[in-house]
Image: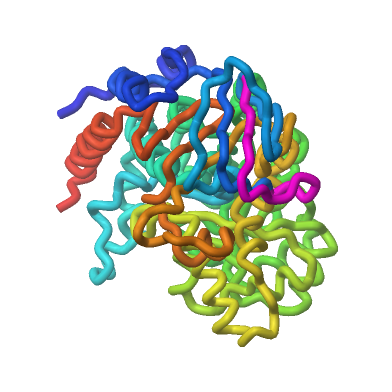
Amino acid sequence: MRKHTIDRRTLLTATTALTAAAILPREARAQAAQGSLPTRGEFVVRGAHVLSMDDKIGDLPAGDVHIRDGAIVAVAASVAAPGAQVIDGKGTICMPGFVDTHWHHWTSFLRPVIRANDPKRTYFPVTFALGLHYTPEDSYRSVRLGLAEAVAAGVTTTHNWAHNVRSPAHADAEVQAMRDSGLRGRFAYGPSLGMSNDKPMDIADWARLKRDIGKDPMLTLGICSRNIDGNNTSRGAINADMAKKEWSAARDLGLPITLHTNGTASVQLLNANNLLGPDVQLVHPLNLLPKDFEALAKHDVRYSISPLGEAGRTGETQLSELMQAGVKVSISIDNVTAERCDCFACMHMLQTLNRHRNAGKFPLSTKRLVQMATIDGAIDLGLAGVTGSLTPGKRADLILVRTDAPNIAPIGDPYDALVQLAQPSNVDTVVADGRILKRKGAFTGLDHDKVMREASDALADLKARAKWA
């Protein structure tokens, strides 16, 4: 059996070796072999079809994006950047990286155990049964696997919805995995599976971790609350008094709050107890009533939609109602055990669901859907001043999507192509905070074979400890 080598002290003192910037495939291969993050350099993407998501800049059918030391310097039809390395953007769409707003990364390596047609081995029973036995090393390796898929699929910011934080060391493990990935994100500190509903979460450790994350420009901290309407008791089902205690502590620390909902009961309870506010993100807009939309808009609450999973749940994903009420919405992955990280498919699913439900009565353009997957996600996570658009002064979080592959070429409207035709395999280049994490379809700072091997080994050990047949 494997010896667990990752502990809290190791994680707090771990550092990531940095190497030269990866532009050329040869350099990318060398860095991937070392398993380290590329350094931030200076480069310019030339001749791409630029979709900036910035109204002042607009879209450029053939434009340049200049990056220096992790920041966007200029976006224009032609940029002078003497001495900068050049990435040929011809045949690509250059756009902001996708911003995921709700993803349970800790469940990622459980995907081999999940079974679609066995009720005892679907997502909830498996994650609860095995989640009780997680070590910090399991948390690290599972999160690392999910983050590798995020990079591959063009996600540059992710909301790590960690609702199985079994100890401070588990929290540190997940945060370290995020740091090692090179991605931007929020860590939402949650409860541990199976904890008593009359016991508060580890509020003291929220403060400790806030001090640590506060020094990291790539990460922010929030909390994910247990359910408060009596549903999904395997994830916790607290009453309003406990919610007030925990939410008040979070607000005293300046931490945003996120919560799964399951219909109107959640929103009504939150509204009746004066818990709604602009620091609240709710997840899964299903089975809500008109009075709920009014309350959400009044209190400037955000809503994260996970369309691939929600399409199979009871009720309708109420996107049009939220948007018509003026509620801010964003797109999320949820998990990659029974679904996949595919923001293109998420946008397409929302387009299809809207057509099915509204028969054209609520126009939802493909450009609006791309905005939901980028700048709207940044707004949801409070990061719109940093990411979500290709705006000079913001950090360089962007992707290049190839438009010459058989599934997408030849393209007409670029937004139509992204929403209706593109898939993760079309993501050629991924840049997060100026670090090139993927180039010409290959990882530049990630040893993917090692990540998969360690995830598989950890799962085997976990199953043995849990006596999982």
Is 58 contained in the magenta span? yes
Q: Residue 370 in the image: x percent, y percent?
A: 61, 57
Give the image quarter of residue 19: top left
- Is 279 positioned to the left or the right of 315 in the image? right
Which residue appears at 45% of the width and 53% of the height? 403
- Dominant secondary structure, magenta: strand
Name the one closer to the observer, 233 or 286: 286
Residue placed farthest to the bottom in the image? 359
Q: Is residue 408 above or below residue 286?
A: above
Q: Residue 131 in the image: x percent, y percent?
A: 35, 46
Do we see residue 168 in this rendering?
no
Q: In the rendered picture of this protein, how many numbered marks are placed on residues?
A: 0
Which residue appears at 53% of the width and 39% of the height? 156
Name the one closer to the observer, 125 or 352: 352
Which residue appears at 49% of the width and 46% of the height? 92
Which residue appears at 43% of the width and 22% of the height? 22
According to the image, what is the colour scheme of the structure?
rainbow
Q: Residue 340 in the image: x percent, y percent?
A: 38, 56
Image quadrant occupied by the N terminus: top left
- Is 141 positioned to the left or the right of 161 in the image? left
Q: Is residue 174 above or below residue 356?
A: above
Name the one closer to the observer, 97 or 124: 97
Do we see residue 73 in this rendering?
yes
Q: Which residues are magenta?
A: 53-68
Give the image quarter of residue 360: bottom right
Q: Residue 215 in the image: x percent, y percent?
A: 65, 19
